[in-house]
Each structure stands twice: as C-alpha cells, then as structure tokens.
Amino acid sequence: MYQQNDRNQNNLYDPVFAPKPPKKHAGLKKFGKAVAGLALVACISVGSILGYNALFPPQAAAPDNAGGAASNAPSASPTIYLPTYSADALTPPEIFQKAVPSVVSITTEVQSYGRIGQGTGTGIVMSADGYIITNNHVVEGAQSVQVTLNDGRSFDAEVVGTDANTDIAVVKIDAAGLTVAEFGDSSSLVTGEPAYAIGNPLGIQFAETMTGGMISAPSREVTIDRYVMTLIQVDAAINPGNSGGPLVNSQGQVVGVVNAKIMTSNSNDVEGIGFAIPIETALNVANDLIEYGYVTNRPVLGVSVQSLTAQEAMLYRMEAGLVVKEVTPGGPAEKAGVQVDDKIIAFNGVDVETFAELNYEKDKCKPGDTVTLTVERGGSELELKVTLGSSSD
C-alpha cells in the first residue's frame, strides 16, 4: 500500500499502475503491476490539512578486435558525445538569475473536510500582461487564488481555465510589464543533461528554492489520478509546493512544468524520481485554455462512467469495472446505441477496466475516427460502432 499525498495526508491510496501493452479482448484481466505511488506536489498547510497532494548518448565505439589477432593498425579514436546544450551552458547561479524573475508563488484557499486550508504552489509567467501557467491540482477547488511575484507584489488571480487530463491550468492577474519566461524545446532533451527546478517547496517560507540534477528520462509514461501522462523524469529534488514551477535546462529555458514525484508510505524507499509536463504540451494546452476555455480537438466518446476496482466494488456493494452512468444526449455514444448501465469491457478490441485505460485508448484516436466499443448488457456482449466526436464541438 502506498501513500499518495492528497488533501488528507493520513489517507492511504492504491498504487498507481503503468499502462499494460495492448491485447485483444478475451475477457476481463487484472490491470498492470504496481510500481509506486505518484504524489502531486502542491502543498496545503493549515491545522491537520497537509499536502496536495521519465536519446541515450551514443556509446563510445570500441575498436573491434574480435578476430583475436594482434593488429598494428592505429586504434580508432573513441567517439566523444558533446550534447548541444554544453556549448552555451550557463552556470547554475546564472541559470537562477535568468529564470527566477518569471517564477511566482501561488497561494489558494481550499475548503477540505469542513475546514479552510491554505494551499501553496508555483507558477510561471507566460505573458507580460499577467497570464501565468501552473498545475490544475494547484488551483482545483480553490475558493480564492493569490499570486506573489518575484519582486514581492501580490495580486488576486482569476482562474482562466483548467485541464485535468494534462494537469495544466492558467490564472490571470491584473498586471503589466511582467518578466516572461524563456521557453525551450523539451523534445530535444537527452538523458543525463542538467536540469533544475525552481519553486516553493513546503510553502512560502522556502520560496525561490532551486534544486539541481539531471534528466533521468526525457519521456516516461505514468498514470496520475486516472490520467495517463507522458512526462519528463528528473532527479532534482521535488517537494510539495514545487507544483506548477519550472523545470529549467542549462540555458535557463523552461522545458517542463513540475507536477509530481514518486512516494511510498516509507519515504526512505524512493529518492529522486520527480516528473514534469513537457513544455510543448503545457503551452499548447495553456494557449487553448486562454483562447477557448477548453482544450480543442480532443476525441470525445460522450459518456460518464463509474470506475470501480473489484475491492472497491465489494466494499460499496456495486459492480466492478466501467459502468456507464450518463450518456450525452445526441453525442457519439448515444448515436451508437450505448445505454446507461452498460458495462464497457473493451475499446477497439483492447480490454479496459479502469477510467485510465479507457482514456488511454481513446486518446490514441482522433475526432471522426470510428471505433468498436464492446459492452456487456443483460449478460450479453455487444459490439457497437462509435464515431468519436471532438471537444471543439
């Protein structure tokens, strides 16, 4: 059993699972293997309310003397790997001085279990006129949001939009002339290059803390809060309060938005496994939220489902799996004949038992694609053809 640092730090949560390889539908199967718990890393602190809370360098070519005979030919020179970042790398103090003016502190008031708690997180200035990017889980459910700039000025903030799928949110303050972050290219990251996180670990007391390390993996698929995400894995120290802050490369450019770390109930079991949302993903979502208020061109099935594990189903005396609880009138699922209380057991021939699995398979598709949804109804299996809609509709 692993601890996921949600609104009540005393609650224990089931482990997060990695997505399983696709397999053809052959009945319900157990999903994945437990790896460790992923904790979102915003911070809530009042009374007992705490926490809210992935190009390898080419190998040097060794001379090939596999034939065994001695050779008088000169040995080949070893290949020296010089990453592109090394030519114009800044020193860590230079990186901090360049990046920190665009890093802000975010404080929220959140009601939890009848109490008003104060949450803290971090944000990144993305426009001079006051748009700030952060994590969805930093501002989710907040009654109020306040932003404190690097120069000490504080502003009340409006939540412009949020997206749980990518854990991105945008807030806006009434300000001008802000220092905008320089955004880099997260798609060019390589394992082993330097990476730095700047934020407010454990709250305002430790504001503008910088921690350093390296890119552990430029692309790692993990599941957080029912959503499968492709994230940057980093070994720089990440703590509650770092959420929404920048992951910075050796040129002081923001390449990711910090959002999670792996934790277990015994904090000594795991060290240095943190994650950040690639900046290309984050900015695409943020720009959609600013312009439209939602993320465009995302495939839509048109159902609301109840997702229960076998253990949860036994506890609540309900049916395990994915049970349709609502069908959007006129939506893709209704047009295909999906009904309330249908149990979804496969998507395009791949078994699905959880919301994360269903969402993972759906998000491989595009709006307008026709997919096969296998449902169980009255003891019989039905295969329904669904043409996916678009969030833009």
Image (cartoon, grey):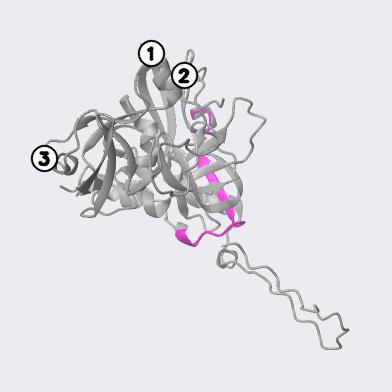
Q: Residue at x 56, y 60 (%)?
A: 190
Q: Which residue is mark 2?
A: 8
Residue 367: image location, x then y, percent: 23, 53
Q: Which residue is mark 3?
A: 330
Q: Earlier in the sequence, mark 1 or mark 3?
A: 1
Residue 390 lies left or right of residue 96; in this view the side is left
Q: Which residue is mark 1?
A: 113
Q: Earlier in the sequence, mark 1 or mark 2?
A: 2
Residue 131 lies left or right of residue 184; in this view the side is left
Q: Is residue 134 visible?
A: no
Q: Are marks 1 and 2 in contact (CB under 8 Å)?
A: yes
Q: Which residues are magenta?
A: 187-203
Mark 1 residue crowding within 10 angstroms, few (<14) / some (14–19) / many (20+): few
Tell me the SS state at disc 1: loop
Q: Is residue 183 above or below residue 225?
A: below
Q: CA distance from mark 1 to mark 2?
A: 9 Å
Check disc 2 and give the amino acid type: Asn
Mark 2 residue crowding within 10 angstroms, few (<14) / some (14–19) / many (20+): some
Between label 3 and label 2, give the one nearer the viewer.
3
Between label 1 and label 3, give the one nearer the viewer.
3
Q: Is residue 200 magenta?
A: yes
Mark 3 residue crowding within 10 angstroms, few (<14) / some (14–19) / many (20+): few
Tell me the SS state at disc 2: loop
Q: Residue at x 37, y 51 (%)?
A: 281
